Image (tube, grey):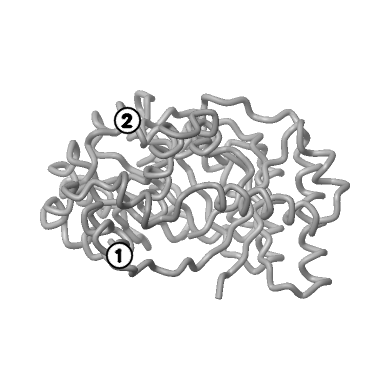
Amino acid sequence: MLRTYVYIEWPGAPCACRCAHCLTSAGEWQTTKVAYARARRIADRFSVWARETQNGVAILHNVWPSCEADSEVLRDVFRFSREQGEPLDMMLNGLRLRTRDQFRTFIAPLVADGLQSTSLSFYGLRESHDRFAARRGDFDYLQMMDAVVAELGLLRHHHILATKATLHELPELLAILNATAGRVSSYASIYDYSGRATTREDWLESSDLERLPEELRSTINTERHKAEAAWVEQILRGDIPAKRKLLYVLHVREESVDRLEQEPCEEILERLRQRDEAARAARPSLPAVAKRYGDRSSQRIYNLCGLERKWYARYYAEHAPERLAEWLDPNADRIRLE
């Protein structure tokens, strides 16, 4: 059974980095001028709707594309998450540069309000990371924030991007990050086919997995991340994994805010569902695009959702180029099945 989520995204928090693989292409589109309070009221409206109808839909509310928002806004976002029973985690990448004291002043009220953990993404050692994040000093800044968070007693999640270009740097990177005392969990991350990542060439391949430090290799779910060739073979024999999540993603922007405030929640989601079903009915099946566009020799590692985006992007480029930009736009309101 699909677990259904509605994401109310307020894209009003600018990102200070321009990461080379950014899944949302942050910095290439304008943040909204819609006041945060209106986004919160919309999130509350959906929350009341879900509770009164007892439909089991989970309502999530975020600032986007970074957490570079006023501290009171962030505290309010966390209050909403707490009301929904969601864990309180904060992504620290993309914050503007602050001194150690300034950062501590920024995050301390959030910790007092119940912030439980923080997440940081690293792209290699200092030189590689800074180049990838397009900000000199970003690696040292992330280490400083990580140390402050450790002092405050929070759990720290380290997401370490594994690519061919930086594979040899990961053992030393892990040693540096693990040298900071405190509670920490490290995970390997692999490119997802979205945003700027669609243009990357240093994609991890299946033969590279053995070169990963065991601490990271053990965090990769090889049932959900495998070579494109393996996915093609699996799909063509009819073994298509069932989706587990249904996500409605709604962005609160100038052109949408009035409708999101006034239209019944059911009608908003139903319109999105109908648009999605019409699009699915008009394009070939997953096995058909796997057979036509799948690379049976590729050892690049993907999750299936990413491969679907890749294969259907090739289909649209060939048959409906006017749909291609919309299909690849990571910031459009849409339904996602994962």
Q: Position of residue 152 (x, y in %)?
A: 48, 55
Marks 1/2: CA distance? Answer: 25 Å
Q: Amino acid at mark 1?
A: Asn
Secondary element at image label 2: helix
Q: 264 or 170, which is in the foreground?
A: 264
Q: Position of residue 67 (x, y in %)?
A: 57, 41
Neighbor class of circle 1 (other Cα within 10 Å; few <14, some 14-19, many 20+) is few
The residue shown at (62%, 57%) is 112
- Left or right, 111 with respect to 182, comes to right
The single residue placed furthest to the right in the displayed view is: 262
- Left or right, 187 with respect to 250, comes to left
Check the image and report above or below for 78 versus 17. below
Q: Nearer the viewer, mark 1 or mark 2?
A: 1
Q: Position of residue 124 (x, y in %)?
A: 25, 39
Location of mark 2 (residue): 132
Q: 162 or 77, which is in the foreground?
A: 162
Residue 221: image tag? 1
Neighbor class of circle 2 (other Cα within 10 Å; few <14, some 14-19, many 20+) is many
Q: Amino acid at mark 2?
A: Phe
Q: Quadrant of the N terminus?
A: bottom right
- Left or right, 216 with respect to 67, comes to left
- Left or right, 311 with respect to 255, comes to left
- Total numbered labels placed on residues in the image: 2
**First in sequence: mark 1 vs mark 2:** 2
The residue shown at (46%, 50%) is 284
The residue shown at (53%, 35%) is 329
